[in-house]
């Protein structure tokens, strides 16, 4: 016989693990503060029975089949999106319309409320379809239904389906919604201390029947130049492990005890998630003036319980008068994506003619939003702080995984920024996983969601597909092709923008195979003026300069010959490789610097007078522009 938790009065819950059903009786409520509740079976919210999740609280459920929640009461959970009424967020609702029927129900924006106190909220004003600008004030929230759309099994911009204020967004379907202007300084939860809208993030109260169980997400064939994609997202009132969803729907099997990932099943999606980012400076509803693009996430780690790789979107930027900004480079932000937070929407790309990807309760975790927790919702606040610790702290989850046994570090990788005509920047990533091949691997490599950009750079791994994440096994002799395309003569400027856990090689070069020249992009930039067209064969990334056989830094250092000529009181340095010497310092045995020279250039020989120095042992320290450090000892004495 099933155990049932009956809630008849007001109950304040901390951490509660319920091996039971949960029933909240009429005119009662459950209040949870800064914790999670785990219900292994279904939740029944009777008429006017409410379930409040506050201060980052979340609900986990353990059923393995279809959703079985029911009731005319409401689960209430907060989430914040952008406050710019010109900018989109991609959402996926954790709730549907309350229903006496068993199972999940559809959602509409009338289920979004404005918080007024810790347990009360008021319905929003849904603006007429012709009005464009949502508004927040200290007494009201107005949402523009004009921008509410969904996108299911489609491959054309014109195939977005208008929703407006209708309750027709199925569980697991994502939707677009623009933010609001104005501000709302109401603090509904004083213990949390967040205003509804301090002019940068708008807080919404999602109220309805909580989604639960296995949710089918329709996907379509991605063959051809315009692949089918579906806007979906996290459909639960808890975070999810995005890796698990992507892996298990891409033909991979996950061992939940070891995290090991093996291939061999049937894939329905391509293993990546695509996140829309809209610039926070957006100031127009005109499509031609949009400033935005899609970032790409691939779960390419050695196990399912460690973070994958995310590359920021590429976008054009515009000046306030609508003209193209040509004064600097711009791209999207760096977000941590492994644990998708409540309400986060994203696109997936199908690989079958038609079918369903499945979201499951087993993917659900209790993780609060933060960089350290690898869980961020796309909105104004963003941090690129690095993750310092190696292992996760405890992550409560439905699958019963002990996350403390797994690394929270990303695989070794480096990111490359390529600036095109000083207008916009493409971010690409090269990552290293010994389970990957040099060719295309599902969930390891990721194609761009912006393949129609007139100028771009990418990895040509498979046919005409344009990859922005390339994962492969590391080999110091590896040569990684890099492709460029342009609709006109274009200047491409390339540099390594970020090293993440990468110490596998001392150098990173772009090799121009036509000129047979190597360009250091780890410590410097490389620019190339290329004609219109697509060039897949001329450039490659390498870790060695084949024109310089001395690839070991210590061997290069030994090519500097330092000679003290005491006959004429001069120090001579021979620079046979014509390295660019940025500093030369001479120290006595006490550590006192007695000679300093800077920006000596690439001459083959330097002469430094030592006539004013006392007899003794001295240390010569040289530093080159490519961060080579040379220490030599000399003896000075008078003849």
Image (tube, helix red, strand yellow):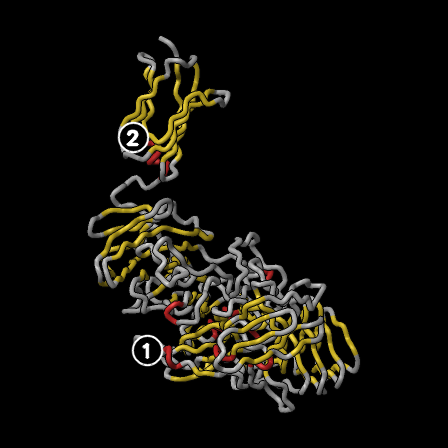
Residue 256, by quadrant, is bottom right
Can you name the residue that lies furthest to the front here? Answer: 321
Can residue 294 be seen by looking at this rendering?
A: yes
Residue 204 location, x and y as percent?
60, 72
Tell me the crowding category of disc 2: few under 14, some 14 to 19, or many 20 or more residues within 10 angstroms, Cα based.
some
Mark 1 lies on a secondary structure that is loop
Kindly identify which residue carries mark 1: 223
Can you name the residue that lies furthest to the left here? Answer: 514
Is residue 21 shown left or right of residue 483? right
Kindly identify which residue carries mark 2: 575
Which quarter shows the N terminus? bottom right
Whichever of callouts 2 and 1 sits on the residue coming sooner in the sequence is 1
Residue 494 location, x and y as percent?
33, 52
Closest to the observer, 275 or 59: 275
Query: Image point 63% across, 74% down: which residue?
Result: 140
Residue 197 location, x and y as percent?
60, 66
Is residue 31 shown left or right of residue 423? right
Which quarter shows the C terminus? top left
- Real-space Cα separation, disc 2 to disc 1, in angstroms: 56 Å
- Tell how many labels: 2
């Amino acid at each position: 016989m099933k155990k049932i938790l009956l809630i008849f009065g007001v109950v304040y819950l901390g951490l509660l693990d319920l091996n039971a059903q949960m029933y909240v009786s009429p005119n009662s409520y459950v209040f949870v503060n800064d914790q999670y509740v785990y219900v292994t079976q279904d939740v029944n919210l009777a008429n006017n029975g409410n379930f409040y999740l506050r201060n980052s609280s979340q609900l986990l459920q353990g059923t393995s089949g279809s959703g079985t929640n029911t009731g005319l009461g409401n689960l209430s959970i907060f989430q914040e999106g952008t406050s710019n009424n010109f900018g989109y967020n991609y959402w996926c609702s954790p709730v549907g319309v309350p229903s006496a029927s068993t199972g999940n129900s559809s959602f509409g924006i009338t289920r979004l409320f404005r918080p007024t106190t810790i347990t009360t909220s008021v319905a929003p004003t849904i603006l007429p379809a012709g009005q464009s600008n949502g508004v927040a004030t200290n007494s009201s929230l107005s949402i523009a239904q004009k921008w509410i759309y969904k996108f299911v099994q489609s491959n054309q911009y014109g195939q977005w389906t208008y929703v407006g204020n209708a309750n027709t967004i199925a569980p697991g379907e994502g939707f677009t919604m623009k933010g609001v202007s104005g501000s709302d300084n109401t603090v509904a939860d004083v213990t949390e201390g967040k205003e509804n809208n301090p002019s940068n993030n708008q807080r919404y109260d999602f109220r309805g029947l909580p989604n639960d169980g296995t949710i089918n997400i329709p996907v379509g064939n991605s063959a051809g130049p315009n692949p089918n994609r579906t806007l979906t997202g996290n459909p639960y009132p808890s975070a999810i492990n995005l890796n698990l969803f992507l892996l298990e729907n891409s033909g991979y099997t996950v061992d939940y005890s070891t995290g090991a990932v093996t291939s061999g099943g049937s894939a329905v999606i391509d293993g990546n998630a695509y996140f829309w980012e809209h610039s926070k400076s957006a100031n127009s509803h005109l499509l031609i003036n949009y400033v935005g693009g899609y970032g790409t996430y691939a779960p390419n780690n050695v196990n399912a319980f460690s973070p994958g790789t995310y590359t920021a979107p590429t976008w054009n930027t515009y000046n306030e008068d609508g003209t193209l900004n040509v004064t600097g480079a711009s791209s999207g932000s760096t977000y941590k994506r492994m644990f998708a937070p409540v309400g986060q929407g994203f696109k997936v790309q199908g690989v079958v003619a038609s079918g369903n990807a499945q979201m499951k309760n087993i993917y659900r975790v209790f993780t609060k939003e933060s960089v350290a927790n690898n869980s961020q919702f796309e909105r104004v606040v963003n941090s690129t702080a690095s993750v310092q610790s190696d292992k996760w702290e405890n992550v409560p989850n439905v699958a019963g995984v002990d996350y403390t046994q797994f690394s929270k570090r990303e695989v070794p990788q480096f990111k490359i920024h390529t600036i095109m005509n000083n207008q916009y920047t493409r971010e690409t990533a090269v990552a290293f996983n010994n389970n990957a091949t040099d060719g295309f691997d599902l969930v390891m490599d990721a194609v761009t969601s912006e393949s129609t950009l007139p100028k771009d750079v990418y990895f040509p791994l498979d046919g005409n597909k344009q990859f922005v994440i390339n994962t492969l096994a590391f080999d110091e002799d590896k040569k990684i092709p890099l492709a460029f395309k342009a609709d006109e003569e274009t200047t491409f400027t390339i540099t390594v923008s970020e090293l993440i856990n990468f110490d596998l090689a001392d150098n990173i070069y772009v090799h121009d195979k036509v000129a047979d020249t190597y360009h250091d992009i780890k410590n410097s930039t490389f620019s190339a003026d290329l004609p219109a067209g697509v060039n897949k064969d001329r450039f490659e990334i390498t870790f060695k300069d084949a024109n310089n056989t001395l690839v070991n830094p210590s061997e290069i250092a030994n090519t500097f010959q330092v000679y003290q000529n005491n006959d004429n009181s001069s120090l001579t340095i021979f620079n046979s490789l014509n390295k660019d010497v940025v500093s030369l310092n001479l120290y006595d045995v006490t550590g006192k610097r007695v000679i300093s020279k800077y920006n000596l250039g690439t001459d083959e020989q330097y002469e430094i007078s030592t006539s004013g120095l006392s007899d003794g042992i001295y240390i010569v320290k040289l530093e080159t522009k490519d961060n080579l450090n040379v220490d030599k000892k000399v003896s000075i004495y008078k003849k």
